[in-house]
Amino acid sequence: MQTEPWAFHHELDPELFTLDKLEALREAAPAGAFGAQLADTGFERPAGTGPTPVELEGTIAEEIGRRPLHLHFHDVAGWAPEYARARDQVFEAAGLDADEPRYAIETVIRIFSPDVPVALHSDGEIQLDCGVGGRNVWHVGPLSALSTSEHESLLRGGQFLRWRELAPVETFDLRPGDGFGSPPRWPHWLEHPGPDPAVSFEVGYWTAAAIRERKIWDVNWMLRKARLNPRGPGANASRDAAKTKLFDLISQVTGKGKEFRGA
């Protein structure tokens, strides 16, 4: 698994990502596979707030130009086979180890109105993002910028972070044909300079190492709620192993996180 953000080039078919094609995809999308929300207004999403969903009154091309929106298609490779082929092309273009198992693979198409931001946040999984329309500008800060508390709460409602200046910052200005990969948890925010809508094809997935790290941070969150003071991943191998087993046991009881059990 890559340990730092990296750039790559892709050759995805641009016809898969025209606004006309995406409008047809919207009409074919199964229930729950397409969403529309108001875009963020700045680089920090206010605490306690979530996305504001909206209904589209016109076509994607009409709506994306008249108000600041973030539109998204989820699990698109699962119901549109042409995007499954695109997903596989992204894995190859990103230069990944083909023998390394991948878990909980997700494919997302995102469309942003020109000039809207995405607030500072972090993702638990590996992200491969491909520019396929307009500009998607990623600003990535160091992994060390996340506090212990932020690591522990990341996947418990803490994905979006308090804004602060990060250093160093590496910028990936994705135009059609450009790709970018981010290892788990690296904090980042985005810009989408106009005049065109920004379209991206995103492939997210987990490795076994990322899953183990997630389990340890999640169990630490629970232990801290019990007024204990757990140490982070890598501090004690035997305790890390016990925490991963505890995560799996809790998953069996609650039915949550079953896709990560045993990894």
Image: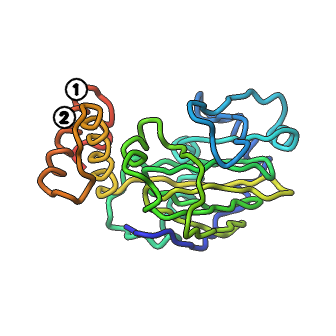
Indicate the position of residue 211 as horizontal and vertical percent values: 32, 51
Mark 1, other Cα within 10 Å: few <14 / some 14–19 / many ≥20: few
Relative to 216, does residue 88 appear above or below in the rendering? below
Say if 135 sits above or below 53 in the image.
below
In the image: residue 10, left or right of residue 196: left
From this view, report whether residue 218 is shown above or below residue 18: above
- The one of 104 and 80 positioned closer to us in this rendering: 104
- How many marks overall? 2
Residue 113 percent location from the top left of the image: 78, 47
Residue type at the position of mark 2: Leu
Q: CA–CA distance between discs 2 and 1?
A: 6 Å
Residue sitting at x 66%, y 49%: 43
- 242 sits left or right of 167 in the view: left
Residue 89 makes an appearance in the image: no
Dot label at residue 38: none
> Residue 72 location in percent, x, y?
65, 42
Please give the residue where the numbered disc 1 appears in the rendered image: 253
Q: Nearer the viewer, residue 47 or 76?
A: 47
Q: Residue at position x 71%, y 47% from top?
A: 111
Which residue appears at 54% of the width and 43% of the height? 160
The residue identified by callout 2 is: 249
In percent of width and height, residue 123 lies at 48, 50
> Does residue 76 appear in the picture of this structure?
yes
Task: Quarter of the image for the N terminus: give it.
Answer: bottom left
Indicate the quadrant where residue 195 lies: bottom right
